[in-house]
Image (cartoon, grey):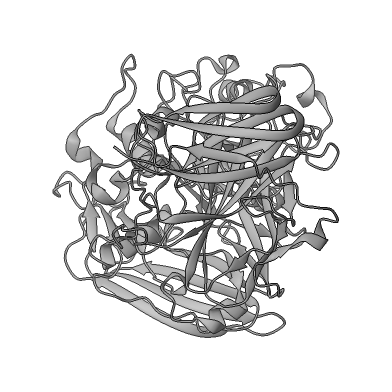
């Protein structure tokens, strides 16, 4: 087990140009705001929330001052839960926490008139009525918290503003409207509540399964495969003023087969016998956050082979009676399915992956990002891939424009002369499928689900059934191009709720600095990829390697909860991965007359294309050995063409050039040497 340094140990913290950010503000940013429903007992507990960012940036709230708010009644309006454009009598919310909706639910009434419907105005109205804090509910079904951005209508806001999930908000609203005034109470703090004895689980700090959903047949075929094993553990905080002794984290795993009853499958306990320091000035301000993961191998098999649901419960205790137990317990669920892999949450009722946020990165909008899956069973084939895309517009469904691409890579750690080290390195991935998907108006809409069930081999010689070899990792990556219009920047959907990093850390710590689990990576900057596209990639998005390399110095809230919402349906369809020309109903359209030279290349490489007839548009895209775009260029009205790739600034390594000419396409692999 390891421990964090208490941020108060470093003294007060402030941002340039601000004067109201105390050490407690920094602690909020370090760990995350702590929101607890304290009454009634039917909904009491720790609720995940995302605080409004504090600072001087365009989306940051400059005036918020965090204080400890303990056991305050909440207020919600019976006719219009958003408090958008309604003025309230001064003092009508004095001493209360206002709980409001992010958007127009219900879509009626004076609250929804005008054009100034935003976070700032809502918060300002609540503050003017005397509210001590504002809790915003994400109105989208399945929506999870995200940091509400600053708007000028909220000047000045001096009270905390946070967001909670739709499910949590619905639960709170239901009880509130069915109860007497003052029944529902909350605490909202940047750290603890001033109690002497108060342990708690750090929000989103509990270990999860590698997958939210995976096929039961794969687990049955390979129950001891490392990625399928479970590792229990969590990040624990001493929110109290006094030290704790005998800190114990107990985990219990139950499995409920579909149509059956829950069965206890595994229990575990971790006990920290030494003093676990609290936050009082009488204690040394260190070790107030602890990573309670085992020092030695303690992973175990998931013993179930039929579809159903796992429920993993964490329970925290110590030798001293805890004065605030709402955050001492947490249950997380994951599933065995008939054929579905999904790292992020999945809507089984509507058969689609869930996304509560949409991401892009780098100075340009173009993005290639995906999800890794481990295959434990032979004779598996990709039957369907699902993912979510947004064009940045909300409200009534908007059509997506342009074309996206799906890459499927097979990753073999230690191949092509590389080191077996659980880091993704150049040359370790092979492109086994490249399939463009032109967006279909009326079918592919912003915030909707893209369903792909036809896949092409990299040379486009026909439709293939992508065979998944047992004991192998596969990377399913979506390439979203630059925007085709000013209002259509494309973003990839992410789960935004489940946090894979506690499990990754536990694996890393348990195994002496080797990750062993592979999560989802994404480059942090397009220019950095161009300068060094062959760099090894650890399993942490946005280069947040400080999460494991420098445990006492990372900001917890900056470890983004980013799991791309890419689900894979893997069946047992036969076909051996061979080309199936009959499935396309016509002769192959491969671009056979394509050469790349010299190969290997040092300073320059030429891609030569000769076509039978003029193509209105030929697009060239160079990607590195991990699927990330290095450069792209389009030529018009082409029959014979040469595309010159400047390789002098590209790092030595393996690359692919993808060429599409109208409805034909192919790819070529090449190497850069120095």
Closer to the camera, 93 or 528? 528
Q: Quadrant of the N terminus?
A: bottom left
List x then y, in percent, for residue 248: 31, 71
Decide: is 320 above or below 160.
below
Residue at position x 17%, y 62% in the image: 275
Q: Is 302 on the left or on the right of 93, as rendered? A: left
Quarter assignment of residue 554:
top left
Residue at position x 36%, y 48% in the image: 537
Q: Is 70 on the left or on the right of 320, as rendered? A: right
Closer to the camera, 80 or 366? 366
List x then y, in percent, for residue 582: 82, 62
Q: Is 438 on the left or on the right of 195, as rendered? A: right
List x then y, in percent, for residue 622: 51, 36
List x then y, in percent, for residue 325: 42, 61
Closer to the camera, 615 or 144? 615
Closer to the camera, 317 or 595? 595
Number of numbered discs visible in the structure rendering: 0
Decide: is 493 above or below 210.
above
Q: Quadrant of the C terminus?
A: top left
The answer to whether residue 519 shows anywhere in this view is yes
Quarter assignment of residue 33:
top left
The answer to whether residue 139 shows anywhere in this view is no
């Amino acid at each position: 087990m390891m421990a964090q340094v208490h941020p108060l140990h470093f003294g007060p913290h402030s941002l340039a140009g601000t004067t109201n950010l105390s050490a407690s503000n920094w602690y909020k940013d370090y760990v995350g705001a702590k929101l607890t429903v304290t009454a009634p007992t039917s909904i009491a507990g720790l609720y995940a929330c995302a605080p409004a960012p504090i600072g001087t940036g365009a989306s940051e709230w400059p005036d918020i001052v965090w204080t400890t708010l303990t056991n305050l009644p909440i207020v919600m309006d019976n006719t219009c839960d958003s408090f958008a454009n309604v003025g309230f009598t001064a003092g009508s919310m004095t001493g209360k926490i206002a709980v409001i909706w992010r958007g127009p639910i219900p879509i009626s009434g004076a609250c929804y008139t005008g054009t100034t419907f935003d976070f700032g105005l809502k918060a300002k109205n609540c503050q003017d009525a005397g509210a001590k804090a504002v809790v915003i509910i994400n109105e989208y079904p399945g929506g999870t918290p995200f940091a509400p951005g600053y708007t000028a209508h909220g000047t000045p806001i001096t009270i905390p503003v946070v967001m909670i999930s739709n499910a949590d908000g619905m639960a709170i609203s239901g009880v509130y409207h069915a109860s007497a005034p003052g029944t529902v109470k909350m605490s909202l703090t940047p750290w603890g509540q001033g109690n002497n004895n108060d342990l708690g689980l750090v929000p989103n700090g509990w270990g999860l399964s590698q997958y939210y959903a995976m096929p039961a047949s794969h687990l049955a075929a390979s129950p001891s495969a490392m990625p399928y094993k479970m590792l229990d553990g969590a990040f624990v905080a001493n929110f109290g003023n006094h030290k704790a002794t005998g800190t114990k984290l107990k985990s219990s795993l139950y499995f409920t087969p579909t149509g059956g009853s829950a069965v206890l499958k595994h229990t575990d306990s971790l006990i920290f016998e030494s003093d676990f320091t609290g936050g009082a000035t009488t204690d040394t301000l260190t070790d107030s956050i602890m990573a309670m993961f085992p020092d030695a191998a303690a992973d175990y098999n998931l013993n179930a082979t039929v579809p159903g649901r796992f429920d993993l419960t964490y329970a925290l205790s110590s030798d001293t009676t805890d004065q605030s137990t709402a955050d001492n317990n947490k249950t997380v669920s994951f599933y065995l399915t008939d054929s579905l892999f999904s790292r992020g949450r999945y809507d089984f009722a509507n058969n689609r992956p869930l996304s509560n946020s949409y991401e892009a990165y780098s100075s340009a909008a173009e993005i290639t990002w995906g999800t890794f899956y481990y295959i434990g069973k032979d004779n598996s084939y990709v039957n369907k891939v699902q993912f979510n895309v947004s064009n940045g517009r909300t409200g009534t469904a908007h059509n997506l424009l342009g074309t996206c691409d799906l890459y499927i890579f097979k990753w073999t750690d230690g191949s092509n002369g590389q080191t077996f080290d659980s880091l993704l390195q150049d040359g370790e991935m092979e492109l086994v499928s490249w399939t463009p998907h032109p967006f279909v108006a009326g079918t592919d809409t912003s915030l909707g689900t893209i369903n792909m069930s036809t896949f092409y081999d990299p040379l486009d010689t026909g439709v293939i059934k992508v065979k998944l070899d047992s004991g192998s990792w596969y990377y399913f990556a979506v390439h979203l191009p630059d925007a085709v219009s000013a209002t259509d920047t494309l973003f990839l959907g992410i789960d935004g709720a489940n946090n894979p990093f506690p499990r990754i850390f536990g694996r890393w710590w348990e195994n002496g600095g080797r990750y062993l689990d592979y999560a989802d990576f994404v480059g942090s900057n397009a220019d950095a990829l161009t300068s060094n596209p062959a760099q090894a990639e650890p399993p942490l998005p946005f280069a947040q390697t400080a999460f494991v390399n420098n445990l006492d110095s990372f900001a917890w809230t900056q470890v983004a909860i980013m799991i791309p919402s890419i689900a894979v349906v893997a069946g047992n369809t036969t076909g051996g991965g061979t080309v199936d020309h009959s499935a396309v109903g016509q002769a192959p359209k491969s671009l056979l007359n394509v050469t790349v030279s010299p190969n290997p290349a040092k300073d320059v490489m030429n891609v030569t294309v000769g076509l039978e007839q003029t193509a209105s548009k030929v697009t060239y895209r160079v990607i590195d050995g991990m699927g990330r775009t290095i450069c792209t260029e389009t030529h018009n009205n082409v029959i014979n063409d040469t595309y010159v790739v400047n390789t002098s600034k590209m790092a030595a390594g393996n690359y692919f050039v993808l060429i599409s000419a109208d409805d034909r396409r192919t790819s070529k692999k090449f190497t850069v040497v120095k």
